[in-house]
Image (cartoon, rainbow, N blue to C red):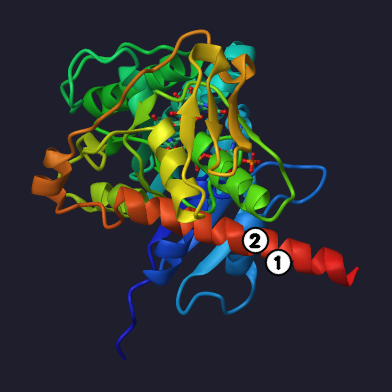
């Protein structure tokens, strides 16, 4: 009798986050047994993976959740010993750059030391698991060249960027020192309808949808001229998976190659809503106006950072050439996708409120 091979097992930290939910979905559809590490919350915070937890949500794989925390080495050792994963995707982090200025030590602990604890646990247990570290373009900070690629020197501009650089170097070092299959995906900004609402793209699409429905008057923003290389989160998780399937472990940049400003993002959103913005004033006095004269956007110093990353633009040629990876969603499509989702969300909430 022929036995089908047992499914591959993946451990995903940060499964409740934006990327974790897309990755889990993708792995389940590939037939993986997925183990998600979750933190204890006073109320459950599984909104992004609820659909995966429902029985029969995936055609093939199975999803299991286990409690753990990147700050607690004992929990990591216990989970790794129990799951013995073929692949570990470390997506967990304190991932908010602005918050990292308020919580620098905490960010260093979770985002910097957390990956080291995972790597050391893998080494200690002598597991052959392949390890993916969610590294960040924030490490390039005050960029030393444009576009940024695998050889561009780092110049982090936030406690978050420094913590990610620490984790990046440790991932490389565990590969070189101990022969672990450990890789860095140096990912530029990636967004989706599941993006946390404190990040600028989602903050804009949510606010615009609410303004359109008369639930909010204005949107307060910080630096409108910051530029980012924004892609779609699902594409970046496909890239993470591809990295762990390669014959040799290596680090790759994942990016679209295009850079757009926060200002452009706002312009496209309000243009799609039929309210093209005109800009008036300068500096902190600048504001964005609707054709009927309403102020739609105002600057608030609250959303500026002590030190800013002015522009990011990645060069993912290496991932394209060696892994065959490329982004599938354009900047315009991404903006439209997020706006359409948030308009629907606001309409649904409004309809519910009418019924109640
Ligand atoms: P996210 O939505 O903020 O998700 C972060 C995840 O980490 C959540 O599941 C969170 O759990 C978990 N987490 C936080 N602290 C933890 C701890 N101490 N122990 C265990 N889990 C913890 O982030 P994302 O946008 O999906 O990003 C995923 C990863 O990619 C992060 O490492 C981020 O730094 C990195 N990255 C993201 C981007 C991007 O543009 N999205 C770009 C480059 C790199 P709770 O639900 O319990 O809070
Ligand atoms: O959306 P953001 O908060 O993302 P940021 O700082 O680029 O970080 C994200 O991408 C990194 C990859 O490069 C990840 F590693 C990290 O985990 C995270 O996912 O801000 C984008 C830009 C910044 O320059 C910020 O100053 O938008 C500017 N901005 C202007 N007004 C604002 C606002 N950002 C936020 N969050 N809120 C504002 O009101």
Q: Toward which corner of the image does residue 109 lie, by quadrant?
A: top right
- Are the residues flagged by discs 2 and 1 in contact, CB closer than 8 Å? yes
* Residue hosting label 2: 345
**Image check: 69 left or right of 83?**
right
Question: Which residue: 22% across, 14% down?
Answer: 153
Q: Which mark is residue 165?
A: none
Q: Which residue is mark 1?
A: 348
335 or 83, nearer to the observer: 335
Asked if 247 appears above or below 170 in the picture, the reply is below
Q: Quadrant of the C terminus?
A: bottom right
Secondary structure at numbered mark 1: helix
Position above or below: 223 against 85: above
Whether residue 30 sits left or right of residue 21 in the image: it is left
Q: Secondary structure at mark 2?
A: helix
Q: How many angstroms separate mark 2 from mark 1 (CA)?
A: 5 Å
Mark 1 is surrounded, within 10 Å at the Cα level, by few (under 14), some (14 to 19) or many (20 or more) other residues, namely few
Which picture quadrant has residue 173? top left
The residue most toward the left is: 321
**Residue 45, position as x, y percentages in the image:** 71, 50
- The response on whether ligand 1 sits within 8 Å of label 2 is no
The one of 207 and 155 positioned closer to us in this rendering:
207
**Residue ID at (66%, 36%):** 218
Q: Position of residue 25 (x, y in %)?
A: 47, 63
* Residue at 59% over, 56% down: 342
């Amino acid at each position: 009798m022929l036995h089908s091979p047992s499914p591959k097992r993946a451990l995903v930290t940060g499964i409740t986050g934006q990327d974790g939910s897309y990755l889990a979905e993708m792995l389940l559809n590939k037939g993986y047994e997925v183990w998600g590490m979750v933190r204890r919350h006073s109320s459950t915070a599984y909104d992004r993976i609820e659909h995966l937890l429902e029985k029969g949500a995936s055609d093939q794989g199975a999803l299991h959740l286990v409690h753990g925390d990147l700050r607690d080495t004992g929990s990591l050792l216990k989970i790794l010993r129990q799951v013995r994963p073929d692949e570990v995707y470390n997506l967990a982090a304190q991932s908010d750059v602005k918050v990292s200025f308020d919580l620098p030590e905490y960010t260093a602990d979770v985002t910097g030391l957390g990956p080291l604890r995972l790597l050391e646990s893998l080494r200690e247990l002598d597991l052959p698991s392949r390890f993916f570290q969610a590294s960040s373009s924030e490490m390039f900070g005050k960029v030393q060249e444009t576009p940024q690629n695998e050889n561009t020197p780092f110049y982090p501009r936030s406690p978050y960027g420094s913590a990610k650089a620490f984790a990046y170097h440790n991932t490389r070092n565990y590969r070189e020192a101990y022969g672990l299959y450990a890789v860095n995906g140096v990912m530029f900004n990636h967004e989706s309808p599941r993006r946390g609402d404190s990040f600028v793209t989602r903050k804009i699409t949510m606010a615009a949808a609410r303004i359109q429905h008369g639930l909010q008057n204005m949107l307060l923003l910080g630096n409108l001229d910051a530029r980012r290389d924004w892609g779609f989160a699902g594409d970046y998780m496909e890239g993470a998976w591809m990295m762990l399937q390669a014959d040799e472990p290596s680090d790759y940049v994942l990016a679209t190659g295009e850079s757009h400003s926060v200002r452009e993002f706002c312009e496209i959103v309000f243009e799609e809503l039929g309210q093209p913005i005109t800009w008036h004033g300068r500096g902190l006095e600048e504001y964005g106006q609707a054709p009927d004269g309403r102020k739609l956007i105002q600057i608030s110093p609250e959303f500026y950072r002590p030190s800013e990353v002015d522009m990011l633009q990645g060069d993912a040629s290496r991932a394209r050439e060696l892994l065959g990876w490329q982004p599938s969603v354009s900047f315009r499509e991404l903006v439209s996708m997020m706006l359409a989702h948030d308009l629907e969300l606001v309409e649904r909430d409004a309809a519910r409120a009418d019924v109640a």
